[in-house]
Image (cartoon, grey):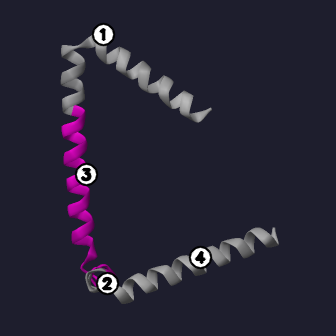
Amino acid sequence: MTRQLRDIIVTLAALSLLCLLLLSISPRLRERAVELGSGDSTRHFEMGRSIVGHAMETTLGTASGYAVSNTYLFVFLVFACVLFVLMVRT
């Protein structure tokens, strides 16, 4: 247990050092970090959620339209994806 804890601490320290190094090098990243650290960050998260929601609606609409037009091919595609995931998993 102590070795795992030590590994976690070393990993977090290395990631923190990497983030600080990137923040010191890139001015755009520094501005973005300050922007997210301020209180105005909720607007950016809401905009991101709306973009993701729109992309999901578009994708599901396209998939359902494709499934209605090509039922047998869509079923084959679903089974092929499931078999591919099972193949990669093992």
* Mark 3 or mark 1, whichever is nearer to me: 1
Find residue 72 and name its label.
1
Compare marks 2 and 3 and give the one earlier in the sequence. Answer: 2
Identified at 49% across, 80% down, the residue is 18
Label 3 CA crowd tier, 10 Å (few <14, some 14–19, many 20+): few
- Which tag is nearer the camera, tag 1 or tag 2? 2
Tags 2 and 3 in contact by the CB under 8 Å rule? no
Total labels: the figure holds 4
**Which residue in the rendered view is the most extreme toward the top?**
72
Which circle, 2 or 4, is nearer the viewer? Answer: 2
User: x, y (%) of residue 8?
Assistant: 67, 72
Amino acid type shown at disc 4 = Leu
- As drawn, 71 above or below 5: above
Q: Residue furthest bottom?
A: 24
Label 1 vs 2, first from the N-terminus: 2
Residue assigned mark 2 = 26
Q: Which mark is residue 64?
A: none
| Residue positioned 38% across, 89% down in the render | 24
What kind of element bears circle 1? Answer: helix
Which mark is first along the chain, 1 or 4? Answer: 4
Asked which secondary structure carries label 3, the reply is helix
For the N terminus, the quadrant is bottom right
The residue indicated by pointer 3 is 52
Give the amino acid type for the residue marked by disc 3 in the picture. Answer: Val
Label 1 crowding class (10 Å Cα cut-off): few <14, some 14-19, many 20+? few
Which contiguous range is marked in magenta?
Answer: 32-60
* Residue at horizontal 27 percent and vertical 66 percent from the top: 45
Quadrant, the C terminus: top right
Q: Which amino acid is tagged 2? A: Ser
Specify which label sits upstream in the sequence, 3 or 4: 4
> How far separated are the C-alphas under marks 3 and 1?
29 Å
Q: Specify the label residue 12 is tagged with.
A: 4
